[in-house]
Image (cartoon, rainbow, N blue to C red):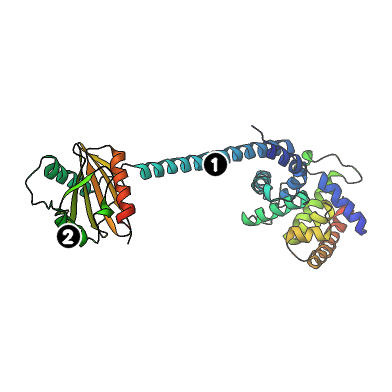
Amino acid sequence: MTPDELDQKLRVAWTAQPLDTAGAEAGIRLAIRRESRRAQLRTLAIAATVVVAAALGALWFLRPQPEPKIFADAARDHRVEVVQGAPRHWRTADTEIDTLTARFGLTRERVAFTGYQLTKARICLLEGQRVLHLVYSDGARDYSLYLAANATAVPNRDARDGAQNIAGFHSTRLTGLVVGEGSPSDCRRFAQTVTKSAGKS
Amino acid sequence: MVNARQTEFERTAIPHLASLLRFASRLAPDSAAAHDLVQETYLRAWRAFDQLKTDSNVRAWLFRILINTSYSANRKAMPTVPLADLAEFSEPSRGNSIEESLEVLEALDALTNDHKQVIILTVMEGFTCREASEILGVPQGTVMSRLSRAREALREALTPRLQKV
């Protein structure tokens, strides 16, 4: 038998084999469709997981933050000492006020608020920390400005406690709170003014 | 719903089904296992279809996947789809009788798996030695030596048998 004869016999025998290509093809097409569907479901499941995770992340990020305790302390202090006028040893003379502000490295000019008069000052405690409490008045409305050393953690945030609006702030030198019955925007404006002028070294 | 990727896959891969099925039937222990092997081959090909370059030889790629699939499934080299059912064989053409075809396939099944694969790929399926070496993952020289030994073994086995038929 020559090599060509052998190859010929092999090819003929090969192609003579019984084959169920139709059945195999149907099975393959079905298997591929199932695989495609599974892949689509997998993709959908992954997308849904990502969306849910993103939504949960956003909810966590946007969850309401509890107000720091120092905000409530300042609001109560303002209410009791300024609004209700509880007796306290206030410094009202300009020289006394200047002495107190100087202890914090400040001058009267650097903590001025246009339209309001700095009327009295004292050192008080907020959350156990000594802070400079300055009271401003335009005759009809009062604001309290609390200034502390920078170590005190006061977020740059607005809050409300009863009738009092509160604006927290911090700069490179000072942290503080403005509390008053004025609008939230007035409180924030006051806080920004102080941050600009008193916050500089 | 059939998407474009699936249509393209079926257009390029399904035409080689008969060749793969014949090859699988000489690797798998029975017809069902051969169908399973081919189906698994097509599924693997489908999953990897995006990685196939446009100018690739799809047929050689499918054979390579089939061989890898048969290895990973730890299938035995022992064939075969039963040869006993003469009625299922196609009517002889170009010279072989049904008995002759059975003798040839029996002799083929008696070869070692390596020799059988080389003979099928090069003689029956028409791959070049270089293509067969890529499909099997062996050097071209190995393919040529296996082919020579396989032909010799087949000639020795078939010469006395075919004289009786």
Chain to which mark 1 belongs:
A
Asked if residue B112 shows in the view, the reply is no
**Which residue occupies 83% across, 60% down?**
B129
Specify few, some or many for label 2: CA neighbours under 10 Å numbering under 14, 14-19, or 20 or more.
some
Q: Residue furthest front?
A: A94
For residue B155, side relative to residue B84 (left or right) = right
Is disc 2 placed on a helix, strand or loop? Answer: helix
Amino acid beneath label 2: Thr
| In the foreground, B110 or B114 | B114
Q: Position of residue B120 (x, y in %)?
A: 79, 54
Q: Position of residue A78 (x, y in %)?
A: 16, 44
For residue A198, side relative to residue A56 (left or right) = left
| In the foreground, B89 or B32 | B32
Q: Position of residue A48 (x, y in %)?
A: 48, 39
Determine which residue is flagged by label 1: A43
The quadrant of the rendering that contains the N terminus of chain A is bottom right
Amino acid beneath label 1: Thr
Q: CA distance from mark 1 to mark 2?
A: 70 Å
Chain to which mark 2 belongs:
A
Specify few, some or many for label 1: CA neighbours under 10 Å numbering under 14, 14-19, or 20 or more.
few
Asked if residue B148 shows in the view, the reply is yes
Q: Position of residue B81 (x, y in %)?
A: 71, 47
Determine which residue is flagged by label 2: A99
**Which residue occupies 29% across, 56% down?**
A198
First in residue order: circle 1 vs circle 2? 1
